[in-house]
Image (cartoon, rainbow, N blue to C red):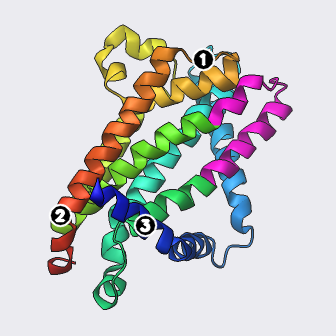
Amino acid sequence: MNKLKIMLLGFYKYKDLLYELVTRDIKIRYRRSVLGLLWTILNPILMMLVMTVVFSQLFRFEIENYPIYFFAGNILFSFLTESTTNSLHSMIESSSLIKKVYIPKYLFPLSKVISSLVNLFFSYVAMMIVMIITNVPFKVTMLLSPILILYISMFVIGLGLILSTMMVFFRDIAHLYSVITLLWMYLTPIFYPVSILKEKTTLALTLNPMYHFITYLRELVLYGTIPSYQDNIICFLIGLTFLIFGLFVFYRKQDKFILYI
């Protein structure tokens, strides 16, 4: 309980630094880019156009409102891969700063998640633009999207803390994680029907956190239904479990970071 209180007080004390870290990440990402932040809207739209042509036309997946079906899955999975991959490298990239002054180390992976949340927001705006173009009506249930963002943010923060800790002691995790995320993407029904995996194995769906998050968003955006009490409990527990475990791993190992970075 004392550690939690110290962490919260430290978070408030260093909130301005966190803001600067997030701002720096966004500026670096779009430095020397002509379109800048506009790419956060254009990129998911261009990706959607490619995937729509490939999967809805060539492979003939009969999915109603396929562009939005794909969009809902892709923006969440892109948020996962971007935030966790950046978190993974955050401690190593900030090693020179960590060696000079005292800064709560969790701020570095946390800043990566928050900057990715900014991209997620603009990607959500891009999805809404495509909904207008494709005549998909807006559902009032979309107003509940922040609840899902809370769930998945807890999940990626926890996972990011675990990965950033592992990276300090085991640098090869960076190469391994890129393979894991690729496999993870193909095991998640982002661009193909859920029925394909259900026919093969339901275990891959049940144990896949991203399946639950993506299904939650599709219910809000595509079907206009409020996710069930059970769906909310599952998503919340996934997020909370990873957050608690991530904090436990990070705080247990952070004092040794200075010896390895």
121 up-or-down from 133: above or below: below
The vertical placement of 138 against 1, above or below, is: above
Q: Which numbered tag is attached to residue 9?
A: 3
* Snapshot quadrant of residue 91: bottom left
Depth check, front residue: 248 or 184: 248
Tell me where residue 61 appears, x and y as whole percent.
58, 17
Magenta-drawn stretch contains 126:
yes
Tell me what residue is drawn at x 55 percent, y 69 percent. Answer: 22
Depth check, front residue: 198 or 226: 226
Pick whichever of labels 3 and 1 is earlier in the sequence. Answer: 3
Disc number for residue 148 = none
User: Is residue 200 at least partly visible in the picture?
Assistant: yes
Q: Position of residue 205 (x, y in %)?
A: 37, 21
Task: Name the image quarter holding residue 131.
Answer: top right
Disc number for residue 253: 2
Q: Nearer the N terminus, badge 3 or badge 2?
A: 3
* Residue of label 1: 60
Q: Position of residue 29 (x, y in %)?
A: 57, 70
- Looking at the rendered structure, the kind of residue marked 3 is Leu
Question: What element does badge 3 sit on?
Answer: helix
The image shows residue 8, relative to residue 136, as above or below, that is below
